[in-house]
Amino acid sequence: MINSLQKHEDSFFNSLLRVQQILTHEKAVKLREQDDISRLDFAELVRKRFSVAVVGQMRSGKSTLINALIGKDIAPTAVNECTATINHFSYSDKPELHEQFRVRWIDESEDYFPLSEVEKWLGKGADDQNALQKVVSRLTGHGSTLDRTKRLEFFAATRFLKTVNIIDTPGSRSTIDEHEQNARSVISRKISDDRGRKHEKATRKEGESADAVVYVLNSVARENDADMLDLFGENTRLSGSNPYNSVAVVHMWEMAWDDMEVDPLQFLEGKINRIQEQLKGKVSTVMAVSALLSRCLDWLQDEHWEFFTRFGKLSRDEVKKLTRSSAFEVKSNSGISVESRKAVLESIKSRLMAVGGMVEDNAKSTTLALTRFLCRFACVRSITRVDELQRQVRELGGMEQLETLLEKQFFARASLIKNGKLLTQVWEPCQIAQEQLRSYEQKREDDLEEGKNILKLLEERGRHDSVLSPAIAYVTKTFDAVSNDALRVKQTRKELSALSRELEKEFESYKEDIQALELIDALSRSSFSDEEINELRRLFGAKGLSLEERLNSPSPTREHVQKRYSVWAQKRINSYGEERKIAILAEKHLENILDALCQ
């Protein structure tokens, strides 16, 4: 019985491969996507590690967010950063790879460079372009520039990268317009326009190939939330991306909090609620995250935290006055001298350059922004203890919540998302191909009908004129060829139709899995026990799609499945609302498994 189910699982991929073969080799099928479909390696796509694309506008802090997720500062950052390449971050336990990065060129060749050279790939202007050309020519002989770079690859041995690969995208063309305007004094309009188009195309390609997408929304320097949402809708969101495998992150929100009469948490809740409502149906979740706050827990030392807690004892008016100047040089009677403030700023800046890997300008701006927020936050919350300030900053940073969300919503459903993605890639071409085959088949049948009449006429006249014998033989041969072609196309169409129905059934099953998991996640209170919730998550594919993984048994029997089916059938009767919907889906899944076991 288990073998029959294993065959069923294998048939899903065999069906995909057969559909691919028909779509790319059947001469009656003419698709614009044929080349793309022929290049799909379904087996490799299934084996490939789960990947998350990070998509965002310039200065949205994508690199800082990526470093916070990874748990190590390897993503390149800069004050005016405009990522000019696709950057991949993967796990490796080889120490030598942690001190260098790999450049994969357009021709698929590759070279390794020390991490200190990565600044030359940030794409800031013509000078950097020339410097890059020189270093590449000298070290590799390629004579290549940014235009010859396919992607950069970075490596680290961190817990997060053991689970998932991260893809940092350069962003859409429109999001770098400001950078391009500044660059046009040294770079021609054509060069910057071409680069913008390449960024947009690369972002779309990488985002669409990733298993999940994290959209990074920058809340800074916008008139209001509506402006930010307009940028998201027009310039950032990938067309056709699925809500269930995407999340929007409102990043660098602490820079937008300026009213000390409003608690940061209250400020955040209002902003997130507004954005969540506007993005309903476009992303699965909207959440606030500050990678900068989270990373400062690793960067800052005890003396810095003690400095911030001194502001927890001051009045809001005093702190407003002290932090109004970007250099914190306002004289006051607070007991915190200008000299001590300047000394702390310099110390934090040096620390960020030493452990955060920042260049001086970036470290300076980061120090000012971070210090201003933490001083004001300690004051608003009246926090005077270091451990309490660190605890609350960790909570406000939101990185642990983001990791939990990614684990719960994406990584645990990796197989579901992958298979759903594979189905989506062939579904529409499959429907178009069926119509083309049907049209081709009809045309061949019309040719056969016309051929019958011609052949009948020739045979009648051939009885009295032997000269027509070669013509009759040729037409007969052609008629048989057309007849065989029509039969072949008819059989292919029927096969494709049957495969399409099979894949549609699988696709509906995957959608039900996702729907059920979302219903489970949304339960605020439940009569289901923790054990039953875990059973449901497994049944709906959160821990894998094989029968053994769904039923949490190395050798499940029909009796075991029948018993669980009876349990959930009874729960369907006794449940209400969302729990009833979940029980119905569980009963249906178990019924399908029973049917497969009987085959």
Image (cartoon, rainbow, N blue to C red):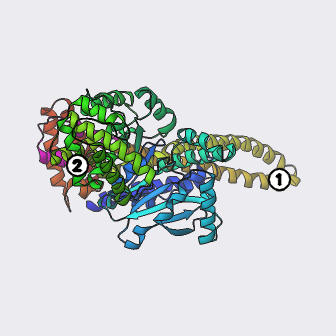
Looking at the picture, how far across and down is residue 481, in whole percent? 69, 54
Residue 139 occupies quadrant: bottom right
Side (left or right) of 551 relative to 119? left
Q: Could you say which disc has been placed on residue 305 in the image?
A: 2
Please name the amino acid that badge 1 sits on: Ala
Q: Could you say which disc has been placed on residue 179 in the image?
A: none
Q: Nearer the viewer, residue 337 or 510?
A: 337
Residue 48 occupies quadrant: bottom left
Q: Quadrant of the N terminus?
A: bottom left
Q: How many marks?
A: 2
Residue 487, placed above or below residue 287: below
Q: Which residue is mark 1?
A: 471
At label 2, counting other C-alpha atoms closer than 10 Å, the crowd grade (few under 14, some 14-19, many 20 or more) is many
Q: Quadrant of the C terminus?
A: bottom left
At label 1, counting other C-alpha atoms closer than 10 Å, the crowd grade (few under 14, some 14-19, many 20 or more) is some
- Identify the element where label 1 is drawn: helix
Q: Nearer the viewer, residue 485 or 561?
A: 561
Looking at the picture, how far across and down is residue 29, in whole percent? 61, 48
Q: Magenta stretch: dominant SS? A: helix
Whether residue 112 is in magenta: the answer is no
Identify the residue shown where x is 51% and y is 63%: 117
Where does the magenta region start and end?
511-535
Side (left or right) of 462 relative to 400? right
Residue 342, placed above or below residue 222: below
Q: In this view of the protein, can residue 8 be seen by the observer?
A: no
| First of labels 2, 1 by sequence position | 2
Residue 3, placed above or below residue 32: below
Find out whether the residues at labels 2 and 1 contact each other: C-beta distance under 8 Å. no
Looking at the picture, how far across and down is residue 453, in whole percent? 74, 41
Q: In this view of the protein, can residue 278 be seen by the observer?
A: yes
Q: Nearer the viewer, residue 262 or 323?
A: 323
Identify the residue shown where x is 46% and y is 49%: 499
